[in-house]
Image (cartoon, rainbow, N blue to C red):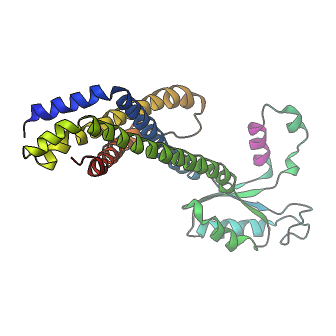
């Protein structure tokens, strides 16, 4: 098979259907860029979960004067109860480390956290904040197991999991990621249909040439290969543009805008971008190649 003939046929096909080819490239690029953004969003959620879940703590609030918890009966935790709780929690296999926070320490942390709200600080006294045990778990998802082990212990008023405060935020991110994938799926379907239509038009416009080639004994592969390569070329160019778009998204949106402003969390790195890019080429080439193949089977009959 002469490579020069195949290349010339590809050039002819691209020139005759230039507008549709450009539309196909743009559609493929947009759909793959949205799909890649969905993959990066998944990695971003995982990075943020790893970052935040590694820092969250379980707070075991101890009874204070007037506490109404079932284990308190209106009286504060005794030193013996506090010591016993500290020992039992520290010995629990789920616990990585635990430390005691007194009311005075809780008040100091409160003032640091709300240092810009003087009115709020003035209306809160150290006696209003409960003493607590701050627990870091080896596995943050094991909160329920720890809570069930100590919720009925004498001197415990309440057990609070900071992870529960983050879960609604991550649920929103996961839903946004799902929306991105749905939009990407619709765009990819549109790209497949457009590529198939482009190949069909190209095959129809060259039906005379392909008919002559069939009469002189050319094989199906020899006849169909230029059309297949046209579709694959559209997929490669579209994937390259999508990859460039993801790289620009990382360089501009993440590195220059978000990271300087949001230093309290983790973001995807270049390694994540480079891990996603090959999938764009696999999907782009695979979908356009399959679309071209089945289109040719239906419409390249001479």
Residue 43 can be seen, yes or no: no
| Residue sitting nearer the eye, 185 or 190 | 190
x, y percentage for residue 20?
38, 31
Residue 126 can be seen, yes or no: yes
Left or right of 244 in this view: 208: left
Please determine whether, in this image, residue 121 is positioned above or below residue 106: above
Q: Residue at x 82, y 65 (%)?
A: 77
| Residue sitting nearer the eye, 251 or 193 | 193
Q: Residue at x 78, y 63 (%)?
A: 158
Q: Residue at x 31, y 48 (%)?
A: 295
Please determine whether, in this image, residue 179 is positioned above or below residue 161: above
Q: Residue at x 10, y 35 (%)?
A: 3
Left or right of 66 in this view: 61: left
**Splitting the image into 4 quarters, where does residue 274 fall?**
top left
x, y percentage for residue 96?
56, 60
- Main structural element of the magenta stretch: helix, strand or loop? helix
Q: Which residues are magenta?
A: 105-114
x, y percentage for residue 181?
51, 48
**Magenta-colored stretch includes residue 106:** yes
């Amino acid at each position: 098979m002469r490579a020069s003939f195949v290349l010339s046929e590809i050039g002819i096909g691209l020139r005759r259907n230039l507008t549709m080819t450009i539309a196909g490239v743009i559609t493929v690029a947009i759909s793959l860029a949205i799909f890649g953004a969905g993959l990066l969003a998944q990695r971003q959620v995982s990075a943020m979960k790893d970052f935040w879940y590694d820092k969250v703590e379980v707070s075991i609030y101890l009874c204070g004067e007037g506490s109404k918890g079932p284990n308190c009966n209106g009286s504060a935790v005794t030193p013996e109860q506090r010591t016993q709780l500290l020992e039992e929690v520290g010995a629990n296999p789920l616990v990585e480390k635990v430390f005691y926070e007194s009311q005075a320490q809780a008040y100091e942390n409160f003032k640091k956290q709300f240092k810009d709200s003087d009115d709020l600080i003035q209306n809160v006294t150290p006696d209003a904040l409960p003493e607590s045990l701050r627990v870091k778990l080896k596995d943050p998802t094991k909160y329920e197991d720890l809570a069930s082990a100590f919720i009925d212990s004498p001197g415990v008023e309440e057990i609070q999991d900071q992870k529960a405060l983050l879960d609604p935020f991550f649920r929103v991110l996961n839903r946004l990621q799902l929306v991105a994938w749905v939009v990407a799926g619709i765009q990819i379907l549109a790209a497949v249909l457009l590529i198939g239509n482009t190949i069909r038009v190209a095959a129809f416009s060259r039906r005379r040439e392909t008919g002559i080639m069939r009469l002189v004994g050319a094989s199906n592969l020899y006849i169909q290969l230029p059309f297949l390569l046209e579709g694959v070329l559209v997929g490669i160019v579209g994937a390259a543009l999508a990859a460039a778009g993801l790289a620009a998204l990382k360089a501009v949106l993440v590195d220059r805008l978000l990271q300087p402003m949001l230093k309290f969390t983790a973001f995807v790195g270049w390694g994540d971008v480079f891990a996603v890019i090959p999938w764009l080429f696999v999907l782009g080439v695979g979908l356009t190649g399959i679309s071209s193949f089945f289109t040719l089977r239906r419409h390249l009959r001479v």
